[in-house]
Amino acid sequence: MSFRLFILSISGVFAFSAGMISFFYESSWLIPVLIFLFTFILSFLILNAVFERFIYRRISSIYKLIHNLKLGKELKDALGDQVYEDPIADAEKQVRDWASEKHLEIKKLKEMERFRKEFLSNITHEFQTPLFAIQGYIEALQEGLLEEDEELAKKFLDKAANNLDRLTYLIKDLNSIYRLESGKTILNKEKFDIIKLIQETIHYMEDNAKQKNISLLLRTKPKSTTFVKADKNKVQQVLINLIDNSIKYGKKGGTTKLYVFPLIEQILIEVTDDGHGIEETHLARIFERLYRVEHSRARKVAGSGLGLSIAKHIVEAHQQNVHARSTIGIGTTISFTLEKV
Ligand SMILES: Nc1ncnc2c1ncn2[C@@H]1O[C@H](COP(=O)(O)OP(=O)(O)OP(=O)(O)O)[C@@H](O)[C@H]1O
Ligand SMILES: [Mg+2]
């Protein structure tokens, strides 16, 4: 009910009561009708003035304040001063909307806070492991290992160098994520045949796959158009990261299949393995920076949890999509699309 209708109703009730009372004392209709009208007008004027002064104006100004805070200065200036029909109902609605908006915002901020904490702890862990190893090897050399056992000292130096390489890769990967996230990476789009690129990448990864006796197979429809428009080097990076995962987390003697499906305006590429798979709870998070499923850490499979994050950033920089599905005990499929020529 609007504010004025409310006052009209109360005045009506007053006027009706006054009219009825005077009707008991008067035999004619005229006086009660006049009393009714007089009471009605008087109560309306008094109530209106009281409400206007003490309630309506205050609520109206609170409402304006909420409205302006919500819109921000620029939008408010653009809209100019508006007349509000029913500030009480509007204020109630806006406060409700505002509360639910704030609730969502707080939820998001809490999520980001959790993510930040996890990220810091992961990054510390990733840097700590190789750094402590290097420190250990150097200390052993300083304590005279070089003179005592030259062969072991050489091995330690190699291991220290490997750990330094790992740190370098980590920093390079983090840097490339930063560049992709901040839009500093420029894509050099060109037309190329994705089948050819997949074949080259399979060839490049074959030695890796052989170490676990994994076969890399390409499956595609014959004679279909497979030309895409994308940054070739970056797409190869995506393919390498996905094939690398399928080998690292695939089973010994397993198979990784690469499918190419031409869609209407896109080409869909799928990398499927028959490894252990990823639990539902982890699946949604594997594209996060530095996220690794616990058993990957426990089993000491080398990696820092950046490969999929880089892949996702590259695909999304092309305004395309990447998707993961997995079934425990059956395997994992990571798919992404590219623009078809
Ligand atoms: N094909 C897969 N099968 C099972 N688990 C997978 C697969 N691909 C990714 N994962 C899980 O997702 C996590 C994140 O993968 P991602 O490629 O981002 O990092 P990584 O392989 O651990 O390290 P990096 O790629 O940086 O060397 C992995 O640690 C692994 O637990
Ligand atoms: Mg990886």
Image (cartoon, grey):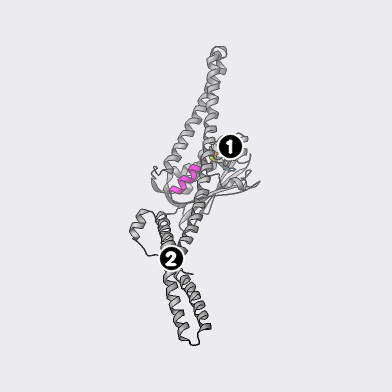
Q: Which residue in the structure is indicated by mark 2?
A: 50
- Could you tell me which residue is drawn at 39 percent across and 47 percent down? 189
Residue shown at 39% from the left, 48% from the top? 190
The image quadrant where one finds the C terminus is: bottom left
Mark 1 or mark 2: name the one nearer the start of the chain.
2
What's the residue type where badge 2 is placed? Val
Of circles 1 and 2, the one toward us is 2
Q: Secondary structure at mark 2?
A: helix
Give the SS element for disc 1: helix
Residue interval drawn in magenta: 305-318
Q: Quadrant of ligand 1?
A: top right
> Predominant secondary structure in magenta?
helix
Picture residue at 47% right of the left edge, 31% below the top: 168
Q: Can I make out residue 6 in this image? A: yes
Residue 56 x, y percent position in the rendering: 43, 63
Q: Which residue is mark 1?
A: 210
Q: Amino acid at mark 1?
A: Lys
Residues packed near mark 1 inside 10 Å, few (<14), some (14 to 19) or many (20 plus):
some
Is-magenta flag for residue 316?
yes
Residue 280 as seen in the image, left or right of residue 46: right
Q: Residue furthest top?
A: 147
